[in-house]
Amino acid sequence: MQTHRLKSWVESANEPASDFPIQNLPFGVFRRKGAKEAPRGGVAIGDQILDLAAVGLKTGANLNKLAAAGRPGWRQLRQVLLLALSDKTKAKRFSRSLVPMNKAELFLPVAIGDYSDFFTGIHHALAAGRMFRPDNPLLPNYKWVPIGYHGRASSVVVSGTPVVRPNGQTKAPEAAAPTLGPSRRLDYEVELGFVIGPGNRLGQPVSIKHALDHVFGVVLLNDWSARDIQAWESQPLGPFLAKSFATTVSPWIVTLEALAPFRCPAFPRIGEDPRPLPHLTDEADQRKGGYAIGTEMYLQSAQMRARKVAPARLSRCSFRDAYWTPAQIVAHQTSNGCNLQPGDLLGSGTLSGTEPGSAGSLLELTQGGKAPLQLPGGETRAFIADGDELIQRGRCEAEGVVAIGFGEASGIVRPAP
Ligand code: CA
C-alpha cells in the first residue's frame, strides 16, 4: 500500500507536528493509568494508543513474540493496521479500543535478554580518542571492526524512570588511592537502539544480506555514563559499573517498514579508509543501509522546571554520522556464531556530528568539564546535576514524505543513596 498520502480518522495523527502519523505505527506496551489491568501491546496513532487486541493480536506483557514473528508477519500486521486506522467506516468499531496516551502508563516494549553497545559514531570516537591520544585518536581497529562491548540488560529502563546517581570508585590523578562516593562526572550519550526480531541459531552467523530481517525496529537510547568511574575502571577490560547503573530507552519501537523512506547511503569510505571485509559488505547495504534519523538531547534543571523554563537543547545528532550500518553491526556481532534472540538490544554508540552543538555527550560539549555550558536562567553545567531531567527526542524528515517521530526517552536524576 502506498502510504505517503494516507490520513487517519484519528484526527490528531494528521497534525504535521505529530510523532505518530499513520505512516509510523510504532509498537509499545501500555495499560490505562491506575487501572488494575495487565500491560499489553498497543500501536501509537496521534495522541492515542490502539490496543492490538482490537485486531486480534494478544501480545501479553511484552512484544517478544511479535518481534520473533519476522518481516512477513510484521508487514501483514502493518497492512491490517493501515486499513483499520485509515478507513472511516471502521472508526466506530476501532475507536472503542483507543486509549489516550496521556491516560496510559508505558512499559519496556520487550523483555531484553541481552544488550550490547557499539561505538559507531566516528566523530564521537575521534573526539573521545583525542582527549587521551591527541596524535592518534582512532585505534587501528576502528575502521575494520564495529567496536562494541556487552552491556547490562537488567538496568535498561523505559522513559520516565528516575535514574539514581551511581556511587563508585574514583581516583583523582594526584590521589594515592581511590575512594568510594557519588559520581561527580555524570553524563549522557545520545544513541539509538536496534531491537532484534528473529534470532539466529548458536554457531550460525547472520549474513549481511539478511541482517535487516533480524531487526524489528528502533528506539531512542540514552547510555548514562559516569565518566569518573569510567576513567578509573575501564583499563583493561572496558566499561563496567560506569555504564551499568541505567540505560534509558523510549517506549515505542519504530519499525524498519516505517523508516524505509529515510534510508540513506552507508557512511562513505574515502581516501585511504579501508573497504570493509567481505562479510561486512553488501551492495544494497552500501547504497541504502544507513538511516537518516535525527535525535536531540534536552536538559531541564530543577530550577528551570520550577520557573517553567522550557528544556534547553544540548545536542543535535544524526544516525547519518554512524560509521557502521545496522546490518553491519548485526553481521559483525553474529560473525563468531554468537546467537541473538528476539528482544535483544544493540546500541549504536554516541552519535556526535561535526557541527557546533552536534556532540552527543557533555564530555565532548564541555571539553571534559573544562568549559561548562550556560543554561537559560543562568545556571551552568559541566556534568549532570541532581534534579536535572534529560529528555531525548527523535524525528525523521524527508522531502515529499510525512515526517515521523520516536516520542521521548527521558529520566530525572536522583541523588546517590
Ligand atoms: Ca555508549
Image: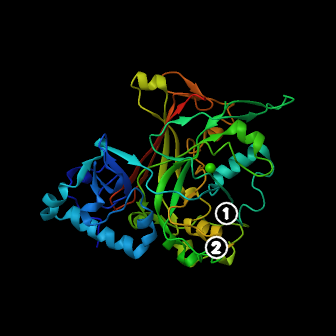
Task: Name the disc covering residue 280, or none.
Answer: 2
Counting labels gives: 2
Which of pointers 1 and 2 lies earlier in the amino acid sequence? 1
User: Which structural element holds mark 1?
Assistant: loop
Give the residue type at disc 1: Pro
Residue at (72%, 42%) from the top-left corner?
Answer: 230
57, above or below 205, in the image: above
Q: Nearer the viewer, residue 47 or 121?
A: 47
User: Would you say the residues marked 1 and 2 are in contact, meaning their CB atoms lie under 8 Å apart?
Assistant: yes
Residue at (17%, 65%) from the top-left corner?
Answer: 87
Which quadrant of the structure image shows residue 59?
bottom left
* Quadrant (top left, top right, bottom left, bottom right) of the N terminus: bottom left
Label 2 Cα neighbours within 10 Å, binned few <14 / some 14-19 / many ≥20: many
The answer to whether residue 89 shows anywhere in this view is yes
The answer to whether residue 6 shows anywhere in this view is no
Give the residue number, with chain letter if any, for mark 1: 146
Which quadrant of the structure image shows residue 63?
bottom left
* Quadrant (top left, top right, bottom left, bottom right) of the C terminus: top right
Location of residue 299 in the rendering, given as x and y in whole percent from the top left corner = 50, 34
Q: Nearer the viewer, residue 298 or 123?
A: 298
Give the residue type at disc 2: Leu
Location of residue 409 in the rendering, given as x and y in whole percent from the top left corner = 46, 45
